[in-house]
Image (spheres, rainbow, N blue to C red):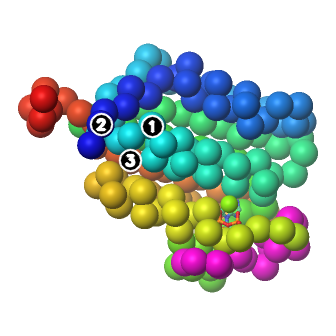
Amino acid sequence: MSRFFITIIWIYSLWYAIIKDMRMRVIVKGIGGFHLACDAEGIYEMISNIISNAIRYTPPGGTIYTEVLQKDKEVEITVKDTGIGIPLGDYGKIFKEFHRSQNARNFVKAGTGLGLTIVNRIVERYNGKIEFESQEGKGTTFRILLPCVTSSFRQD
Ligand SMILES: Nc1ncnc2c1ncn2[C@@H]1O[C@H](COP(=O)(O)OP(=O)(O)O)[C@@H](O)[C@H]1O
Ligand SMILES: [Mg+2]
């Protein structure tokens, strides 16, 4: 597996490519960059899916907050929105293929319900973790934790 150097600048450019002229506030925090044991395509797929969900399920005027932090040997990528939230009863379903919660269907008609399934598979492939917390009507926070490449387990 190749290594990918994720930088805050890169996250910024991803945001600007996606958000264009949407009326939303985007905050990106973090310093520098981190070496991850991922390929660029995988990390792009993960982050762009989580970001596009935050955009899709947040009404205009909302805020989306992104942060990349290094915590010991892990990199933590957080995407927090002030959107519609995930109903409590659906917490166990959102990573299942084709699942779309009723509030999400009401808010945005179209959708495949496959984004998070794909994200989850990629996270597993990279030995990472994905977690979320949410409150219906208030917002959602997704957190992806990925192992960081350090000299102790570098393969080259
Ligand atoms: N940021 C979010 N806010 C509210 N609900 C979300 C968010 N992200 C995911 N969900 C819920 O998880 C479901 C599955 O997400 P996903 O697999 O990306 O499918 P899709 O975006 O096509 O609906 C969504 O339909 C929605 O119910
Ligand atoms: Mg999606």
Give the residue drawn at x 90%, y 45%.
Answer: 60
Residue annotated with mark 3 = 145
Give the residue drawn at x 64%, y 31%.
Answer: 14
Residue annotated with mark 2 = 2
The quadrant of the picture occupied by the N terminus is top left
Residue 125, percent from left and from top: 33, 58
Please tell me whether residue 107 belongs to the stretch shown in magenta: yes
Residue 93, percent from left and from top: 57, 79
Q: Characterize the local packing of mark 1: few (<14), some (14-19) or many (20 or more) Cα atoms within 10 angstroms.
A: some
**Residue type of the residue flagged with mark 2:** Ser
Q: Nearer the viewer, mark 3 or mark 1?
A: 1
Sequence-wise, the earlier of marks 2 and 3 is 2
**Residue type of the residue flagged with mark 1:** Ala
**Residue type of the residue flagged with mark 3:** Leu
Q: Are marks 3 and 1 in contact (CB under 8 Å)?
A: no
Sequence-wise, the earlier of marks 3 and 1 is 1
Q: CA distance from mark 1 to mark 2?
A: 9 Å
In this rendered view, identify the residue nearer to me: 6 or 136.
6
In this rendered view, identify the residue nearer to me: 25 or 48.
48
In the picture as drawn, the residue positioned furthest to the bottom comes out as: 89
The relative height of residue 135 versus residue 40 in the rendered view (above or below) is below
Left or right placement of residue 155 versus residue 96 in this view: left
Left or right placement of residue 126 versus residue 116 in this view: left
Q: Magenta residues?
A: 96-108
